Image: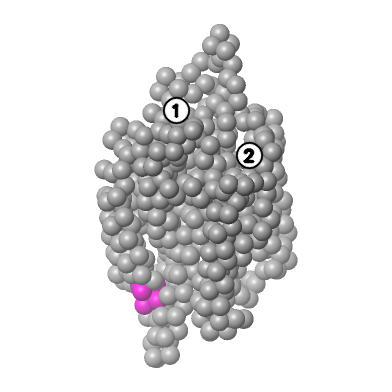
Amino acid sequence: MTTASRTTASTAPPEDRTTGLSSSDRTLIGLLVFSAFVVILNETVMSLALPRLMADLQISAATGQWLTTGFLLAMAVVIPATGFIMQRFTLRQIFVAAMGLFSLGTAIAAAAPGFELLLAGRIVQAAGTGVMIPLVMTTAMTLVPPHARGRIMGLISIVISVAPAVGPTISGLVLSRLSWRWLFLVVLPIALLTLALGAWKVRNITTPKQAHLDVLSLVLSAAGFGGLIYGLSSLGEAAGHAPVAPWIPVTAGLAALALFVWRQRALQNGRGPLMDLRVFRHRSFTVSLLVLVTGFIGLFGALILLPIYLQNVHGTGTLEAGLLVLPGGVAMGVLSPIVGRLYDRFGPRPLVLPGTIALTAALWLLSTAGPTTPLALVVGYHVLLTSGLATLLTPLMTAALGALPADLYGHGSAIISTLQQVGGAAGTALFITVLSKTTTSRLADGADTLSATTAGIQQAFLWGAAISLVAVAVSLLVRRTEAVVPGHAAIH
């Protein structure tokens, strides 16, 4: 993306000396960040509603988790095309389309008579959400000077991390008094108001240009990510009644992704790839991305598992469960801007390693929680988890995109967003799979329901802790990156 011509110095609006942004730039970024918060909130708003939906719609936990996994999967299918979208259309056009889709999906979900249409509404919501995330990241990287990017990315990381974290709390507050439909009816007027405000206030900062959309790449991307996540999610069928053996879609998905990579490389010197994989030539981008994906596996796995633990093991109500996960979301919101300032001063390494260690420790501690564990202690474990993630997200996103030349920001943010969502979907599928398999095995051995469920939850958190050790190891390779200007392709 290329920044449009700025107003002359005599007519330019006053700049913030800290960030170097004009008042109109700050307004634009603020509006985009708020819009992103509204749409991303819906990634996890259904997690606490799962027990209610299982009863009302007569579905299993493995089926119900598709309301979250399907949302993440749809985003992973849409996001790869955002590099093309941001080249071809103006910022205002993209914003209106994204918020319009999100509002439409919210209305469909609110009126859904059953699970199928509810899932369809969630997928339409996800189509709008998937475009919004890389749009915010790319706009920020385009407007914000390098010395202040940590602060602005700290605000964006609040959206990406805190919105999913507080989703269960809002869900609990709504479900304590109202039906699950109000999870969407409450959001709909806010989404419509945001759409109207954005159509009025969002200005164009880029010049659209002709870009080629490779349909085959889009199909391969959808088949690859779709097959991989469908196969992982099928493992969560406790009764083992998945329509096809899970290894079939996983294998097909990996094959499609291999073809997708081959296709992108083939298009590199021609009409241009759907997703420019040259970003992986930059060491800091690749290393940061690996740690990010591992972190999101733990985050989304914990977000779907913790409400089940609180309600099914501790016997809390939906409102109490929602309030119990609120401190974790608050901790992320408080820490993210602080971490952004620390990044601008010290770089990523002093922040990322402690963050990955905190993440691993929190998941291990959660694996020890049982029916008699004090709720205050469980809340403390969750706060440690979210604090570790807050320490990770801003440095890693900023270091990853900061390693790229400006003309690759759109593709870099699309790849980060895609793999974050795939990591989140994989984490959800993994935790539910381990929970289902372990619970079924314990029940078959004669254990009571409470003991079997507790064992399943503990085993799932233990798996998460083991996987997060990869993030600890890779975080040792993270280092500060210098800003790369257009036309330079220095590899960090």
Most common secondary structure along the magenta stretch: helix
Q: Position of residue 86 (x, y in %)?
A: 62, 40
Picture layout, residue 405 above or below residue 435? above
Residue at image position (45%, 64%) is 427
Which of the image's four quarters has the N terminus?
top right
Q: Give the image quarter of residue 320.
A: bottom left
Q: Give the image quarter of residue 447.
A: bottom left
Residue placed furthest toward the top:
10
Q: Position of residue 487 (x, y in %)?
A: 49, 33
State the extent of the magenta-drawn residues as a range. Answer: 454-459
The residue singled out by tag 1 in the image is: 145
Residue at image position (51%, 50%) is 277
Which of the image's four quarters has the C terminus?
top left
Q: Give the image quarter of residue 379.
A: bottom left
Picture layout, residue 418 above or below residue 485? below
The residue singled out by tag 2 in the image is: 87
Color theme of the render: one colour
Helix, strand or loop for disc 2: helix
